[in-house]
Image: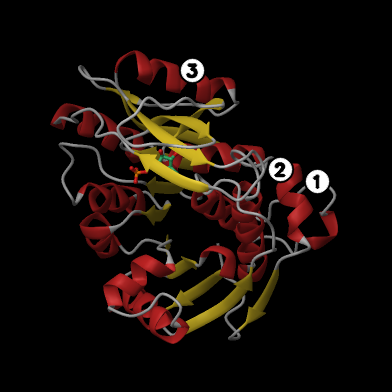
Amino acid sequence: MFFTVTCNPALDWMMRLTSFKEGATNRSVFDELSYGGKGVNVSTMLHRLGLETRASGFIAGTTGSALAEGVEAAGVPCDFVRLPAGQTRINVKMKRGEIQDALEETEINGRGPEVGGAAVAQLRERVAALGEGDWLVLSGSLAPGCEAGLYTELARVAAERGARCVVDTTGAALMAALEARPFLIKPNNHELAELAGCDARDEAAVIGAARELAARGARYVLVSCGGDGALLVDADGLVARGSAPSGVLVNSVGAGDSMVAGFLAGLAGAVLPGCEACCPGEGDLSYALRLGLAAGSATAFSSSLATAEQVADLLSATSVEQATERSAVHL
Ligand SMILES: O=P(O)(O)OC[C@@]1(O)O[C@H](CO)[C@@H](O)[C@@H]1O
């Protein structure tokens, strides 16, 4: 089972505008609500790809209730810790341009409610219930009040119970989490370039920065590179390079989370509708990378998180170049 933790989930309010003027009243031409936060998106995509998942983290107020209800209604079981005060944030995702055209995206992410020690203890208990064969996915920014080491602590609790851990966050929280030796982290090439002080298009330098994170504790580093695909790196260097299918970027919200979910589903040997012959079984890194690319791209090419059918349609358009013999992992 894939247990996702989103410390600061959000109602994502997507608004499409044909034009936008600062300091004026602007009106949208299309609005859509989705239930988000990075871990929630990972759970939603894993569920769509046929895997067992449970979404957790912290929720508060009426917006928190709406989020949990919406996620449950989408078929994903939830086990959120309820905070005593505040409201789960509403993140505004503004898209400027005509529907189905390439757009300019602007995001305003809210601060979110304050998380106290009692709520953290409840989340720790939920993580402590995981066991052998389970996965803990820690995704997104930490909420106000959370210590930078929270993910490290939760990852250690999971590891003690025999569960594997995935961390998708940035900055101090990511660096601290490396101490708990997660199985996978997913920075993008821009984040790595910033760490290394290099250009994001400098593949060798990006791989070098990813290797460094692997040497500091991550077993695999999945580097998303937008339309240029993704790189899979371990402490010995590049494991595989994957190319993304071509298409028009309609929505980048949740594309990275879809990639994480697709990668994990691929590792678990998920079989997509109509792609029965493509699945080599569990633990195949190349298939995991292809499914990650297909899921990330399918979401990027549709107005919100992609369906399993949309992911399946793109699977054959992905390709992976294996850089080493390290093509499988024992799970
Ligand atoms: O503020 P964070 O936690 O970094 O990111 C939150 C967020 O932008 O990430 C998801 C897309 O990845 C959205 O559903 C959500 O609004």
The residue that appears at 35% across and 48% down in the rendered structure is 158
Dot 3 amino acid type: Glu
Q: Say which residue label 1 marks.
A: 273
Of the two numbered discs 3 and 1 on the same chain, state the one appearing first in sequence.
3
> Does dot 1 land on a helix, a strand or a loop?
loop
66, above or below 241, in the image: above
Dot 1 amino acid type: Pro
Residue 266 placement, left or right of 160: right
**Mark 2, other Cα within 10 Å: few <14 / some 14–19 / many ≥20:** many
Residue 283 placement, left or right of 17: right
Q: Residue 181: x and y, percent?
A: 32, 64
Q: Say which residue label 2 marks.
A: 308
User: Residue 213 has which mark?
Assistant: none
**Mark 1, other Cα within 10 Å: few <14 / some 14–19 / many ≥20:** few
> Does dot 3 land on a helix, a strand or a loop?
helix
Q: Is residue 77 visible?
A: yes
**Which corner quadrant of the image does residue 292 belong to?**
bottom right
Q: What is the CA distance from the residue labelled 3 to the residue labelled 2? A: 22 Å
Asked whether the residues under the numbered discs 1 and 2 touch, taking CB atoms below 8 Å apart as contact, a structural biologist would say yes
Of the two numbered discs 1 and 2 on the same chain, state the one appearing first in sequence.
1
> Does dot 2 land on a helix, a strand or a loop?
helix
Residue 205 placement, left or right of 252: left
Q: Say which residue label 3 marks.
A: 69
Dot 2 amino acid type: Ala
Q: Could you say which is closer to the camera, residue 195 or residue 117?
A: 195
